């Protein structure tokens, strides 16, 4: 075990500040040093203020041309006044910074850092940072870390605490070297301590890259070791649930309102062969959003039931569970099949739950769809033959395992839309057979896309309104739930929904949805949306996975610059599910050409696999941190796309050392074993691919 040092032992961190840190998941010194910056700032030489600087954050050397005036407005203290470089005059406004009162007096000179705005030819700035000449010259010398914060905690405090923790408290020593010399050389890695220190306080941009790569290595080796420990199972294990092919699934296929695509047919053929082949199935179906994976899952469950066995499908969200359950029920009714099925989630009432539990244990319920509620100990199956995970990457390894343990080696079917390059999936899903659904249903029209700036909003609203008039529905996605300090230019669903109510005709029904709402409320809203009782759903990314409302034909995504391409693609997958032409509108709030180029990839293709590849290419080495592919593996710093090659070569390395030393008992490798076991906890309870 490592030494545990509470962050309160660091100078300047008392009970209160510690509480803020705790909110960010930082409890120990080690947590703090592993709390990596989100980005860096470079304080450049001050520039001359002119309209060309507008919109960017810059520094200016200016003197105060008049004493600032301060007034109170409700709970705000507002200070206004002008500053000048001797040529241009800039009007400044400050909020709630009473300590600037004595500073903003006529004649004083400071470096002001902020975003210059041009209002009808008049220059102004709100709440710029203010530095003395002396302070600024120190800042100019390096790159400074910018951390993700929480209310009450400033960047300065985090930075200072990290610095103290590292040097005054000497906690940098926690990061011992565990790799053998030859591995360090082979991968050209910098020492671990240097990497930790440098990621917080880098010398320059290249140094960040070097440190990042080392820390990514440390995370990836743990992760890959974990994958291995879970996939050491024999590939060809005899199954206790051997089945025979029956007519039922084919009868259902014939009655579907559509013809299965070739990819769907092949996937189901693979599954049928597995289930009837006498060995335990362990198969992953990879298919882009909207490729029609659900029906394949349902057909597999039918085959199981027809053989007299039970099957369970687990999904990551309550919303999705409810939706799948309804669809399964309709499928059974349409085909006149009389089978007992159940929905088990956190919302299930106690009485219903009791019924379901007894139905599962006596075997009378043949199919169950549920959320993590399925994992609970009390859930016992009579003969669970097939476990399906939809949106597989959303579940933790331990969760998935625990459902498998509810039966002696059930067949496993995982479904994922995560577009992972094939080479990489071989490393990540070592023991799984793979079926890829490449084609989309041919009845679909290609989604039309556009990437535009915020000035396009009104046009977009008009467009959405026209679609609504045609009887269609729309999603608008915002990154935040509610307003957040420091993120003034990031849209939130709460305010947004209110704002647009004034912009649309009165009869347009607008609702908002986010993950912090109670499950019952979420379900009701989603239900209303799918019944067509809501026209515009303003939502966070809670609708990202799985939701299927074919009548929705527009998705507008605010602050698209804040999302990874793969995630935007997932979001866009919510539309284009029916027969009507669908549209996605990506609003780029960044005003940057580089960002626009990245987003334009979404314009050029609707193919998730290609998007992942392009994403990889665009974000090469130049991009310090890239945009983390959220929703995948909970890496602090590694990234399955960016570190694609590193993952592959660590995989090779592990193959080599584990071949001769499978338990890593050899003294040379024992450091790797210890490092892995100390850090494993990070992945195990979380979602992973
Ligand atoms: P995903 O792969 O993203 O889970 P779904 O299974 O939710 O996709 O399917 C998306 C929509 O496409 C559903 O409304 C489904 O009924 C429909 N669908 C599935 N297969 C086909 C097909 N072969 N032809 C036409 N529509 C299909
Ligand atoms: Mg799905």
Image (cartoon, rainbow, N blue to C red):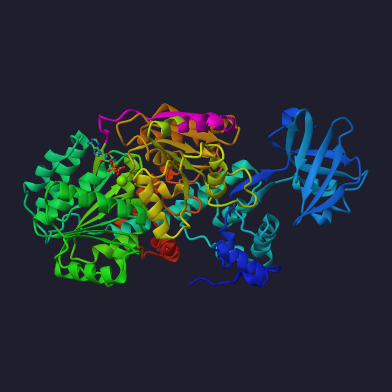
**Residue occupying image coordinates x 69% and y 66%:** 168
**Residue occupying image coordinates x 22% and y 70%:** 355
Q: Is residue 101 left or right of residue 149?
A: right
Q: Is residue 75 visible?
A: yes
Camera-side residue of 534 and 93 = 534
Camera-side residue of 362 and 629 = 362
Q: Is residue 537 magenta?
A: no
Camera-side residue of 232 and 593 = 593
Q: Is residue 405 left or right of residue 130?
A: left
Whole-percent x and y of residue 229? 31, 60
Whole-percent x and y of residue 203? 66, 46
Q: Is residue 445 magenta?
A: yes
Which region is colored magenta? Answer: 438-465
Q: Is residue 689 visible?
A: no
Whole-percent x and y of residue 241? 11, 59
Q: State ligand 1's quadrant.
A: top left
């Amino acid at each position: 075990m490592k030494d545990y040092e509470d962050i309160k032992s660091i100078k300047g961190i008392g009970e209160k500040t510690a509480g803020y840190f705790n909110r960010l998941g930082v409890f120990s010194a080690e947590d703090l040093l592993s709390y990596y910056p989100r980005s860096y700032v470079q304080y450049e030489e001050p520039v001359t203020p002119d309209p060309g600087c507008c919109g960017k954050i810059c520094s200016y050397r200016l003197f105060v041309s008049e004493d600032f005036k301060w007034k109170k407005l409700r709970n705000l203290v507002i200070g206004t006044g002008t500053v000048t470089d001797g040529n241009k005059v800039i009007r400044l406004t400050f909020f709630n910074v009473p300590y600037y009162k004595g500073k903003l007096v006529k004649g004083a000179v400071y470096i002001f850092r902020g975003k210059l705005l041009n209002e009808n030819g008049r220059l102004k700035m709100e709440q710029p940072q203010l530095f003395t000449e002396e302070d600024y010259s120190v800042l100019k010398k390096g790159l400074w870390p910018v951390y993700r914060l929480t209310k009450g905690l400033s960047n300065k405090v985090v930075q200072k605490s990290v610095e103290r923790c590292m040097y005054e408290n000497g906690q940098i020593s926690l990061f011992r070297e565990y790799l053998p010399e030859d591995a360090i050389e082979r991968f050209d890695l910098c020492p671990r301590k240097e990497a930790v220190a440098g990621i917080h306080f880098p010398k320059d941009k290249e140094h960040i890259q070097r440190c990042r790569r080392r820390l990514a290595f440390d995370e990836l080796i743990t992760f890959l070791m974990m994958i291995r420990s879970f996939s050491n199972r024999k590939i060809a294990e005899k199954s206790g649930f051997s089945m025979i092919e029956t007519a039922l699934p084919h009868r259902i296929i014939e009655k579907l309102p559509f013809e299965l695509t070739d990819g769907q047919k092949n996937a189901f053929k693979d599954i049928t062969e597995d289930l009837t082949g006498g060995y335990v199935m362990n198969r992953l179906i990879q298919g882009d959003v909207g490729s029609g994976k659900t029906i394949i899952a349902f057909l597999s469950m039918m085959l199981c039931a027809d053989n007299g066995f039970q099957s369970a499908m687990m999904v990551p969200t309550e919303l999705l569970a409810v939706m799948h359950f309804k669809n399964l029920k309709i499928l059974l009714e349409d085909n006149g099949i009389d089978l007992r099925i159940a929905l088990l989630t956190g919302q299930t009432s106690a009485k219903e739950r009791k019924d379901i539990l007894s139905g599962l244990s006596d075997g009378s319920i043949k199919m169950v769809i549920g959320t993590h509620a399925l994992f609970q100990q009390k859930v016992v199956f009579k003969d669970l033959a097939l476990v399906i995970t939809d949106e597989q990457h959303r579940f933790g390894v331990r969760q998935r395992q625990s459902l498998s343990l509810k039966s002696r080696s059930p067949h496993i079917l995982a479904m994922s839309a995560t577009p992972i390059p094939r080479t990489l999936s071989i490393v990540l899903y070592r023991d799984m057979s793979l079926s890829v659904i490449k084609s989309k249903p041919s009845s679909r029209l290609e989604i039309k896309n556009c990437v535009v700036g915020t000035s396009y909003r009104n046009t977009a609203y008009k467009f959405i309104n026209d679609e609504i008039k045609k009887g269609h529905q729309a999603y608008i996605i915002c990154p935040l739930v509610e307003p957040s300090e420091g993120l003034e230019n990031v849209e939130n669903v709460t305010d947004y929904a209110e704002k647009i109510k004034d912009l649309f005709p009165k009869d347009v029904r607008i609702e908002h949805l986010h993950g912090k709402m109670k499950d019952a409320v979420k379900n009701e809203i989603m239900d209303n949306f799918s019944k067509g009782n809501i026209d515009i759903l303003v939502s966070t990314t809670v609708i990202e996975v799985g939701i299927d409302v074919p009548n929705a034909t527009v998705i507008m995504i605010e602050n698209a610059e804040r999302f990874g391409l793969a995630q935007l693609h997932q979001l866009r997958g919510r539309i284009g599910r029916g027969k009507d032409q669908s549209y996605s509108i990506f609003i780029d709030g960044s005003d940057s050409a580089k960002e626009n180029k990245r987003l334009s990839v979404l314009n050029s293709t609707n193919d998730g696999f290609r998007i992942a590849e392009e994403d990889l290419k665009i974000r090469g080495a130049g991009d310090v941190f890239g945009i983390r592919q959220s929703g995948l593996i909970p890496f602090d710093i590694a990234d399955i796309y960016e570190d694609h090659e590193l993952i592959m070569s660590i995989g090779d390395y592990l193959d080599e050392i584990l071949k001769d030393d499978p338990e890593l008992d050899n003294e040379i490798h024992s450091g790797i074993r210890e490092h892995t076991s100390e850090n494993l906890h990070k992945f195990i309870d979380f979602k992973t691919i």
